[in-house]
Image: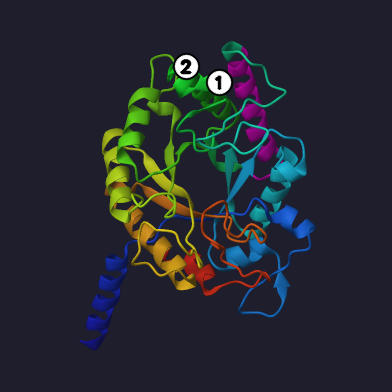
Amino acid sequence: MRFIVTLFTALFTFNHLGRALQYHGADFSSLVNLEKSGIVYKDSSSAQGAKFETILHNHGVNLARIRIWTSTNDADYSLNYGLALAKRAVAAGMEIFVDLHYSDTWADPGKQAIPSSWPKDLNSLNTQIYTYTMNLVNSFSAQGTPIKFIEIGNEINSGILWPIGQISVNGYAGLSELLHSAASGVRAASSSTKIMIHLANGWDSSSISSFYSQIFLPGKLSTSDVDVMGFSFYPFYGTGATLNNLKSSLQNIINKYGKDVMVVETDWPTSCPGVALSEPSVPVSAAGQSTWVADIRNVLSGLSGGHGLGIVYWEPGWIGNANLGSSCADTLLVDSSGNTRSSISMFSSSM
């Protein structure tokens, strides 16, 4: 009887917390550049230094997100830089998730510049983005690190390859055409790589629905070109980024399109003075980091049809850039000396 009660309690607790997700990810694209600057990482459970990808995998990370810019400089996330990092990630036991920025520098909703060496008209850009994407996917496959997921653009709420693919300038038609060309390049190189559209502010149902209601156009991007819908979800860019809003937004988009979804960028601070966070009940601490991610896990695991696939924590070890572009002081899973915090355990099998 005691065994039955214990088993029931364990099952109830697991179901209450939410089912584990398939992918426990981290974007640690900055790693090699950090190592070149002398950064060394140490797991709190051991006094010995270790490669950061090994520490991450030992704590449950099974998916490495790697950003690639069109730059040829390793310091600016070149293809060669990404390929080398992918080898290390696969050797550590991870699958590969590539985040294409289609720019020489950062691409996000506020900037999506055409690479300096690329053409500047729509027809030529369609050819360029197709060829570039196809060759890149082939490069990863050729070295034995095939891409599991690929984002055809990073946080593309406002479009890509501005001004040609900029929504505010040319509407959705040019963007839809460019995304179809990029997706076609992926399909030409690999039948197994999953294509993702990545939007910021995954909690904002209105803007997410508006984007998807206009991006699929006859003869251009179709729903069959997209396998996964990815979203950023940060707590410090607006108090509307609540867990309830995220759940509603993701469920609405699943109801309409039936696609799998992932939260592909998120983090939570250990220090954030003077900033109104979207979930004030979550403590600003390492424990709060684990709570935040567990809460996102619960949202994803509760979506219909098992469509919630996974979570990617953004740059958990970027020492020297601890605020990661936010208004907070520190959102890393390591301290300034490279020692892991207790929150590194968030990637465990229960994520």
- The C terminus sits in image quarter: bottom left
Name the spot of residue 344 as percent of width and height, x first.
Answer: 54, 68
Q: Residue at x 38, y 58 (%)?
A: 297
Q: Is residue 132 shown in magenta? A: yes
Looking at the picture, how far across and down is residue 331, in whole percent?
53, 61
Work out whether residue 176 can be spotted.
Answer: no
Q: Is residue 16 above or below residue 201?
A: below
Q: Is residue 347 left or right of residue 294?
A: right
Q: Name the spot of residue 157 as percent of width and height, x first.
A: 45, 33
| Quadrant assignment for the N terminus | bottom left
Which dot marks residue 123? none
Q: How is the image coloured?
A: rainbow
Which label sits on residue 163? 1
Mark 2 — residue? 170
Marks 1 and 2, the one that precedes in the sequence: 1
Tags 1 and 2 touching, CB below 8 Å: yes
Q: CA distance from mark 1 to mark 2?
A: 8 Å
Image x and y of residue 329, in percent = 55, 62
Q: Residue at x 34, y 61 (%)?
A: 19
* First to last magenta residue range: 124-145
Q: Is residue 295 above or below residue 108?
A: below
Q: Is residue 27 visible?
A: yes
Determine whether, in the image, residue 261 is placed left or right of residue 326: left
Prevailing SS of the magenta stretch: helix
> To which quarter of the image does residue 167 belong?
top left
